[in-house]
Amino acid sequence: VNITTLSIGDELLYGETVDSNAAQLGERLYLAGFKVQRHFTVGDNEQDIMEAIEILTERSDVVIVTGGLGPTIDDITARAAAKITSRRLILNDEALTHLQQFSEKLGKELHPANEKQALLPAKSTVIPNPLGTACGFALTHKGRFLFFLPGVPREMVRMLDDTVIPFILPRRKQKTVILTKVLKVFGLEEAAVGALLQEVALPDAGITTAFCVAYPEILIKFRAEGTNGAELTEALDKTWAAAKQLLRGYVFAEDGETMDSTVAALFRATGMTLALAESCTGGMVAARITDIPGSSAYFLEGVVTYSNSAKERTLLVPATLLAEKGAVSAEVAKAMAREMRRRTGSDIALAITGIAGPDGGTPGKPVGTLFLALADSAGCQTKRYTFHGNRSEIRLMTSFTAMDWLRRRLSSIQGEMTVQ
Ligand code: ATP
């Protein structure tokens, strides 16, 4: 089945909205065993929409269009679809009933402008939208299937999964199996990861490896494609396990996991508790920790001691130490972590102090200089880092590094527990 996709919306062309629908369509169809052959993006212009549909229809069995089904005057997809397929726009009873029922459910009266959303090309099949007002619709044109879905990403994805993919699945000529597995790596350069993985004996079973840098993480995607599912699974698992072994220590998550969910799972598994004292990250680490539901079981407290006086008052960092070593120093980070642990009674306390820039650097401590300290029953360790990039990159890198340190520490605590 040849599939092409079309995104409609001026905002996509002007860079106001990232065309995430194209990515979602590509990924979901790929995982369902289809490859999108082409993708077009056009603005809210009837002529352009019609031309794009015409070109894509000529080259594919299935065209999936998103966007422009709303109630406003720039939403002209249904009209363009009617014109290109030489049909009339007619009030579709099913779509109108959906509109009325959806408004009722929200406790709202249906705005007359919304009724326009029930005007669909004649002989369309309605694609239900459980999450929004705009129904989608499907048509056949020149023996091809055209699907029209709303632009709102979560509505589009739901309708793709519920209706479009189930419809096209049985029409595949060759049943291709596509399997993917992901490793997420932190703390190694991309080139180093690539060099290490060259050692993995990739079986010839159609396994490909793709690298994707989602700063500051590196995602390694292993893909297996073929017709024998059992063989592919075995080959993929083997390759993946070999890669994981080579990159051990640097792999912080697999498949759908994230750094934050991994750290959360480790806190739950070890029963450790945490307190945080942050300066230049302004609570970013606390935000990552509390982003995970259930974090109250292990996260006791976080403070943002941004000024020197806050460090003195809240964390009892001596004024003399601040004057002598500077607020950005290993000694101050250590004092912050120790006091945070003492005053909260947490098992682990982590402290961060640094210079995120763009000002405040000195030759000895340039912008991007960070000190992290981790206090636990084994003592208090500090680490110095020099990160590059702009302020937000430095802050992001710092919060990620702090999470990674927690991950490493908790993993080793977990290891010790297992041995005992
Ligand atoms: P609605 O009924 O909500 O108006 P619609 O089909 O008219 O649905 P649009 O008006 O085109 O959709 O877009 C609705 C929202 O979805 C907008 O915020 C738009 O920026 C976003 N959107 C549209 N197309 C895409 C896309 N390709 N990728 C990501 N977001 C998109």
Image: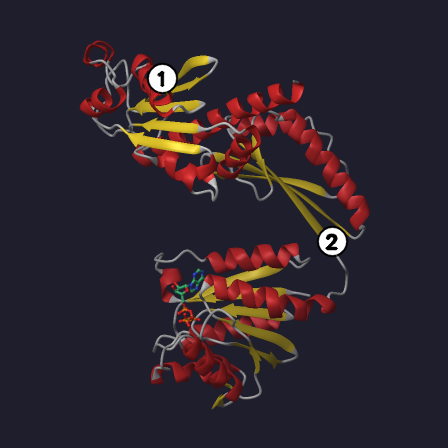
Per the image, label 2 sits on a secondary structure element best described as strand
- Dividing the image into four equal quarters, which quarter contains ligand 1? bottom left
Looking at the picture, how far across and down is residue 170, in whole percent?
Answer: 73, 68
Colour convention of the picture: secondary structure
Apparent side of residue 360 relative to residue 262 in the rendered image (left or right): left
Residue at point 25%, 16% (across, down): 317
Apparent side of residue 313 relative to residue 144 in the rendered image (left or right): left
Residue at point 72%, 35% (across, down): 239
Looking at the picture, how far across and down is residue 385, in whole percent?
Answer: 38, 20
- Camera-side residue of 244 and 306: 306
Earlier in the chain: of badge 2 and badge 1, it is 2
Q: In this orientation, does residue 119 appear?
A: no
Looking at the picture, how far across and down is residue 138, in whole percent?
Answer: 58, 78
Quadrant in the picture for residue 312: top left
Q: Looking at the figure, which quarter contains the N terminus?
A: bottom right
User: What residue does disc 1 label?
Assistant: 338
Image vertical order of residue 59 relative to residue 313, above or below: below
Q: In this orientation, does residue 27 appear?
A: yes
Q: Looking at the figure, which quarter contains the C terminus?
A: top right
Per the image, label 1 sits on a secondary structure element best described as helix
Looking at the picture, how far across and down is residue 374, in whole percent?
Answer: 42, 19
Q: Amino acid at mark 2?
A: Val
- Camera-side residue of 330 and 164: 330
Tag of residue 177: 2
Residue at point 44%, 83% (across, down): 100
